[in-house]
Amino acid sequence: MDIEDRFSVVCPYCGEQMEIYVEPDVKGSFVQDCEVCCNPWRVRVTGRGERRAVHLMRADGSE
């Protein structure tokens, strides 16, 4: 598990900051639940290699 596959994120529901792991071959978006409040995130992965970025938004229909 390389450091560039870990991303610091802030939950758009509870505001808790945490680190998530995204496998190197993942592209596009997927849904993942917050480890703290259990609400669903839409996780969008952009870029590749060292330029990968992760963006979170709500995935409960309120976005």
Image: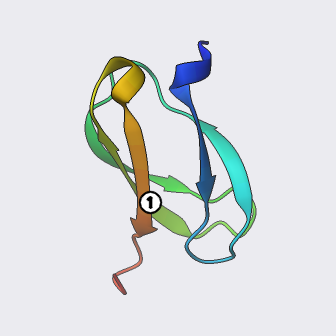
The quadrant in which residue 33 appears is bottom right
Q: Which residue is mark 1?
A: 56
Q: Secondary structure at mark 1?
A: strand
Outermost residue toward the bottom?
62
The quadrant in which residue 38 appears is bottom right
Q: Residue shown at 40%/54% (left/top)?
A: 55
- The number of numbered discs placed on residues in the rendered structure image is 1
Q: Residues within 10 Å of mark 1 (few under 14, many from 20)?
A: some
Determine whether 5 is above or below 41 in the image.
above
Determine whether 54 is above or below 11 in the image.
above
- The quarter of the picture where the C terminus appears is bottom left
- Horizontally, residue 14 falls left or right of residue 5, namely right
Q: Nearer the viewer, residue 38 or 21?
A: 21
Q: Nearer the viewer, residue 7 or 43?
A: 7
Q: How is the image coloured?
A: rainbow
Horizontal and vertical percent for residue 61? Answer: 34, 82
Determine whether 10 is above or below 37 in the image.
above
Horizontal and vertical percent for residue 54? Answer: 42, 45
Q: Residue shown at 37%/31% (left/top)?
A: 52
Outermost residue toward the front?
51
Horizontal and vertical percent for residue 11? Answer: 61, 66
Q: Residue shown at 39%/70% (left/top)?
A: 59
The quadrant in which residue 7 appears is top right
- The quarter of the picture where the N terminus appears is top right
Q: Residue shown at 69%/76% (left/top)?
A: 14
Horizontal and vertical percent for residue 42? Answer: 39, 59
Q: Amino acid at mark 1?
A: Leu
